[in-house]
């Protein structure tokens, strides 16, 4: 993800992103991530207030075409928030945030029609088949 977008996520969610991790997905999922991480940040703030160990992001990446968010010290309420984001990511193009669906290729991606065509065309170019 573009470092400027990552900086916004870090600035909006300083507790959740207090460890320096890379965010290994494309920019199309930025808004989904921002919305999700704001919710998780609120849960972090609750934990802090309650004197509990505070949840922290350990890895954010694309896996099998879906968004994956790995955390330590998650409160119960975080699991639903993360599962919802992972489900939602399968309907959002990872490149442009348009309406997407899970696409099969040499790699699984969630892409809109336009980006799926571009992706397929790029594979044809690489492999020389039709
Ligand atoms: Zn797209």
Image (cartoon, grey):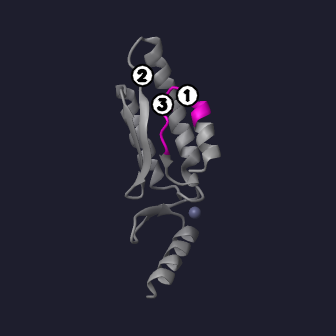
Sequence-wise first label, 3 or 1:
1
Sequence-wise first label, 3 or 2:
3
Q: The C terminus lies in which quarter of the figure?
A: bottom left
Q: Marks 2/1: CA distance?
A: 12 Å
Number of residues whose C-alpha sits closer than 10 Å to that of mark 1, classed few (under 14), some (14–19) or many (20 or more):
some
Judge whether 7 appears above or below 44 on screen.
Answer: below
Q: Nearer the viewer, mark 3 or mark 2?
A: 2
Q: Are marks 3 and 2 in contact (CB under 8 Å)?
A: no
Q: Quadrant of residue 31?
A: top right
Q: Can you give x and y, in whole percent of width and height, for residue 8 in the image?
A: 63, 38
Q: Can you give x and y, in whole percent of width and height, for residue 14 in the image?
A: 55, 28
Q: Marks 3/2: CA distance?
A: 10 Å
Judge whether 89 appears above or below 114 on screen.
Answer: above
Q: Which residue is mark 2?
A: 54
Number of residues whose C-alpha sits closer than 10 Å to that of mark 3, classed few (under 14), some (14–19) or many (20 or more):
many
Sequence-wise first label, 2 or 1:
1
Residue drawn at point x = 58 percent, y = 53 percent: 27
Q: Nearer the viewer, mark 3 or mark 1?
A: 1
Q: Main secondary structure of the magenta part?
A: loop
Q: Which residue is mark 1?
A: 14
Q: Secondary structure at mark 3?
A: helix
Q: Can you give x and y, in whole percent of width and height, for residue 57 in the image?
A: 44, 34
Magenta highlight range: 10-22
Q: What is the number of callouts on the image?
A: 3
Q: Which residue is mark 3?
A: 40
Which residue is most to the front? 20
Q: Which labelled disc corresponds to residue 44?
A: none
Residue drawn at point x = 43 percent, y = 30 percent: 56
Q: Is mark 2 within 8 Å of ligand 1?
A: no
Q: Secondary structure at mark 2?
A: loop
């Amino acid at each position: 993800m573009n470092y400027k977008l990552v900086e916004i996520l870090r600035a909006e969610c300083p507790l959740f992103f207090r460890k320096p991790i890379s965010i290994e997905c494309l920019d199309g999922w930025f808004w989904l991530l921002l919305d999700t991480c704001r919710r998780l940040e609120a849960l972090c703030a609750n934990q802090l207030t309650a004197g509990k160990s505070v949840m922290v992001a350990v890895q954010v990446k694309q896996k099998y075409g879906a968004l994956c968010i790995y955390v330590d010290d998650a409160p119960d309420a975080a699991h639903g928030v993360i599962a919802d984001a992972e489900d939602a990511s399968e309907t959002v193009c990872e490149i442009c945030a348009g309406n997407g669906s899970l696409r099969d290729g040499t790699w699984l991606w969630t892409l809109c029609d336009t980006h799926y065509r571009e992706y397929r065309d790029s594979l044809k170019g690489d492999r020389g088949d039709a």
